[in-house]
Image (cartoon, rainbow, N blue to C red):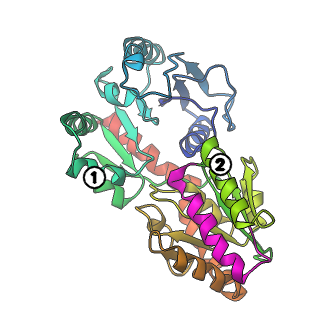
Amino acid sequence: MKIIFVIDQVYLHGGIERVLSIKANYFAAKKGFEICIVTTEQKNNKPCYHFDDKILFKDLGINYNREKSYFHPVNLKKLPKHIRKLKSEIHYFNPDVVVVCSHSTDTYFMPFVKKRIPKVKEFHYSKHIEIESRQNPKNLIKKYFLKFADYVESKYDALVVLNKDEATYYKTNNKVIIPNPLTFYPKEVSSISEKIVIAAGRIAPVKGYDMLIDIWNTVYEKNKDWKLYIYGEGDLHYIKTLQDKITVYGLEKVVFLKGSTDAIKDKMLSSSIFVMTSHNECFPLVLLEAQACGLPIVSFDCPHGPRNIINTDNGSLVSLYDNDSFAKELIRLMDHKEELIRMGKHARENSSQYKLNAVMELWESMFNNLISE
């Protein structure tokens, strides 16, 4: 089976890029599979994650201006070149199926290119963010753009969404629910002995790290010997805002912005609790990774990812934006190690259902069905 994965780039750390590396490597290692990853703006950078040497890479060199909308005239004029070069690569590689991973302009024209080849679009963000725009569009352009997006989505052979809640947002009958696979399932688990709470992910306002620092200021009043480590890179302005908030609260000795890491598993194994304060999520892989390491999780019950992973046996869901309750739950768990150990055990058990082989069998089955049809 020959598969093309389409994405904007694979040199920046991110959930989409990470999951793509897992899927592509899995298929590349299987006999009878050929994998090609087509990018639009790799810019001669090395991939930030490991990819099997058998995977073919092709960059189209479109290089959209990411500081502007994809639909800004500066970027729209690059669209004909993008379509032409992508069609050429598909013709040359002659795949059995094409998977669109990114949310670039190719999302909107791919179903109409080489129609005989099955096309799959996978979504890694929550459509919950579109509810307000759909119910109260600010202008006709937005209203009709959303209708256009619905039409395009209906033309894909399959839309892969990460959980049953997200599936309710799509108006088509081509939805397939496939969760993200675990990136690792270590033999060992956290001893829950270190007084460290960990958070990890892209550093951006949507992740709510500013609220997490507010929460920690409350926690610090009760537990001054616990530390909070935040791993990730991203918005430099937001990072400065977070560091300033840490300084204002006087938390410099207990709250640390650690930057990106290639050893997140080891960092989790050296921690005792994982926390998430996002405004919205789709199906956060990082929560599964934390559970695989035996970490209990405290998270806001944001739409919609955490509630599909966390239950009362393996963690705590806190009402969205209820900082006081979040802080109280952290303080409670910090004072009850036996509860942390119990939750960590169940977290590990829950994560096992997302092991690589089980999830990738769902992908392979879908591909076979699409090709046979």
Query: Which residue is the site of mark 2?
Result: 239
Q: Main secondary structure of the magenta part?
A: helix
Using the image as rendered, state which of residue 332 and residue 265 is in the foreground: 332
User: Residue 313's spot in the image, x, y percent?
Assistant: 54, 81
Query: In which image quadrant can residue 245 be found?
Result: bottom right
Q: Residues within 10 Å of mark 2 (few under 14, many from 20)?
A: many
From where the camera sits, is residue 7 visible? yes
| Residue kind at label 2, given as amino acid type | Ile
Distance CA(mark 2)–CA(mark 1): 28 Å
Give the mark nearest the N terminus, 2 or 1.
1
Q: Residue 143 vs residue 214: left or right? A: left
Amino acid residing under circle 1: Glu
Coordinates of residue 248 in the picture (x, y in percent):
69, 62
Q: What is the span of residues highlighted in magenta in the rendered image?
A: 204-227
User: Mark 1: few, some, or many residues within 10 Å (few <14, many ≥20)?
Assistant: few
Measured as percent of width and height from the top left, residue 160 is found at 38, 46
Residue at image location 65% in from the left, 82% down from the top = 331
Of helix, strand and loop, which one carries label 2? helix
Quadrant location, the C terminus:
top left
Q: Mark 1 = which residue?
A: 132
x, y percentage for residue 176?
35, 50
The structure residue drawn at horizontal position 63% and vertical position 60%, both measured from the top left corner, is 289
